[in-house]
Image (spheres, coloured by chain):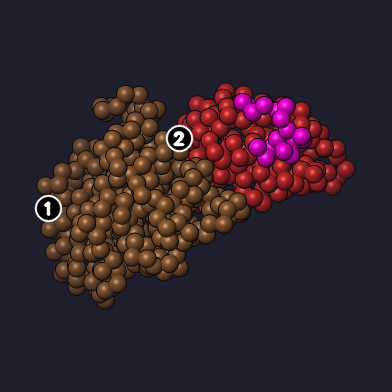
Amino acid sequence: MKKLINAPADVVAEALVGFERAHAGRVRVDHANRLVLRGDAPRRGKVGLVSGGGSGHEPLHAGFVGPGMLDAACCGEVFTSPVPDQVIAATAAVDGGAGVLHIVKNYTGDVMNFEMAAEMVAAESGVRVESVVTDDDVAVQDSTWTAGRRGVGVTVLLEKIAGAAAEEGRDLDAVLDVARRVAEGGRSMGVALTSCTVPQAGRPTFDLGEDEMEVGMGIHGEPGRHRVPLSPAREVAEMLVEPVLADLDFTGGPAIVLLNGMGGTPLLELYLMYGEVAALLEKAGVTVARNLVGNYITSLEMAGCSLTVLGADDDLLRLWDAPVDTPGLRWGA
Amino acid sequence: MVSLGAAVAWMADFAAVVAEHEAELTDLDRAIGDADHGANMARGMAAVAGLEPGGFADAGEYLKKVGMTLVSTVGGASGPLYGTFFLRFAGALGSGPGAALKAGLDGVLARGKASVGDKTLVDALAPAVSSFESALTDGAGEDVAWGVAAEAAESGCEATIPLVARKGRASYLGERSAGHQDPGATSMALLLGCAARTLA
């Protein structure tokens, strides 16, 4: 394992120290609870947006805290969900009287910890909490017989769009409605060229040959649909586009497309892949109205990428275009 | 009835047993999960072992704190599941250990939405609960019932080996999850084994 760390057990805490220094004034860090909070939280009368999950997916979620996106991110251990205490503390810290939305990726641990936190908040304070769960990974088939599709790239788009809705003053029901439309309207598929290495594990999560790739892997190195020989980008693009379009029809309106890097693939390759993917989408009759290319929901140093397609409408496009000012995503601000 | 002293002894025993089996639980989890069950349970039970029992009025109050402590320290899916088990168990303990076990199981079912046969800790807990109840119905004392329950949990745990996981991270493996004993069912069987030693 070659990593720029001191001790594996200290990675998350020490990264938060650096994050706070890098973005001083714009965000606050609650080190005891491992929370990243918007510098001006709580905002009176604004719906608070809280997300979180295991660390190792940066910039998600801490990098998306700021005006136009999240109010707080709860940072768990690497690939381990935060505990309810963190979510409860974050919810209290961002509540401005208009209620709080929890944005949760569909993993067994994340869902249960956020659910317990929401129940405890309801029992012990007057804060109204609603939750939205993202589950866009079409690689998980037979979802009735599993923990269900995993939450991946759509989470980034949802945090941006729901964040804009909250920023412009919509109430909790309206923000929840926007969030649900995004969660239901997006699908993703990824491919891994190499494994990631969890610092505390010290060795790669899975073994993948020099000439192999895993199609449909998850952002924690979960197994995908199948392992195939390393193929040219044009063929890989087909392997991503085909299952996404087979799962949902995106030809009815404009689409927002995220071509996301897993952490270990250069932008040169991501742009090459975006070219291939965009051409295939266009050929299939999908109108790509907006796009985002880069590392937004990563899996430590894993090489590979994922494609997310979100069916949008004028309202969602307008919210997508609204100003955002966070460490990981910034425009119009 | 479960006394405060017995409940404290149960948790001390479980903390020791989890520490002893930490590597085994982690290896089981590496095969079909994410290799952290041993470390997570050991961290949680070390925190539980550090609770000062003098501050509690009775076993119910103490085990409620055990549940809260596990929720706050274990993380992942096991934290909420074990935490919920103890919170509900503690809440129903006034009606006896059989009712407490049943309440604990109901809490876990509601939290995890798993059924028997999904290859989760429910596969160890559910047969233990029904065996405890039938033993009492058959006229056995609570001491005998705990032993029967622990044996049922052990068998239920072993019976997870051929199952295909339908809940939790192992479910992403589909058929590839068969042939491995479920780590959560294993720690649950250990917990009930400790109960038979300390509560009987």
Viewer-proximal residue among A270 and B26:
A270
Query: In the rendering, which numbered label is found on residue A272?
Result: 1
- Residue A10 can be seen, yes or no: yes
Helix or strand or loop: what does disc 2 sit on?
A: loop
User: Where is residue B64, by image quadrant?
Assistant: top right
Verify CB contact (< 8 Å) between mark 1 and mark 2: no
Helix or strand or loop: what does disc 1 sit on?
A: helix
Query: In the rendering, which numbered label is found on residue B152?
Result: none
Image coordinates for residue B146, horizontal then vertical, percent = 76, 36
- Residue A227 can be seen, yes or no: no
- Tell me the CA gap for discs 1 and 2: 42 Å
Chain identity of mark 1: A
Q: How many marks?
A: 2
Viewer-proximal residue among A308 and B190:
A308
Viewer-proximal residue among A133 and A42:
A42
Q: Which residues are magenta?
A: B49-65
For the point 57% across and 57% down, which residue is it?
A126
Q: Residue B57: say if magenta.
A: yes
Q: Colour of chain A?
A: brown
Quadrant containing the C terminus of chain A is bottom left
Residue reaching furthest to the right: B139
Three-letter amino acid code of the residue under disc 2: Ala
Which chain is assigned red? B
Q: Which residue is mark 2?
A: A32
Q: Residue A163: say if magenta.
A: no
Chain identity of mark 2: A
Image check: A22 left or right of A41? left
For the point 19% across and 68% down, which residue is it?
A289
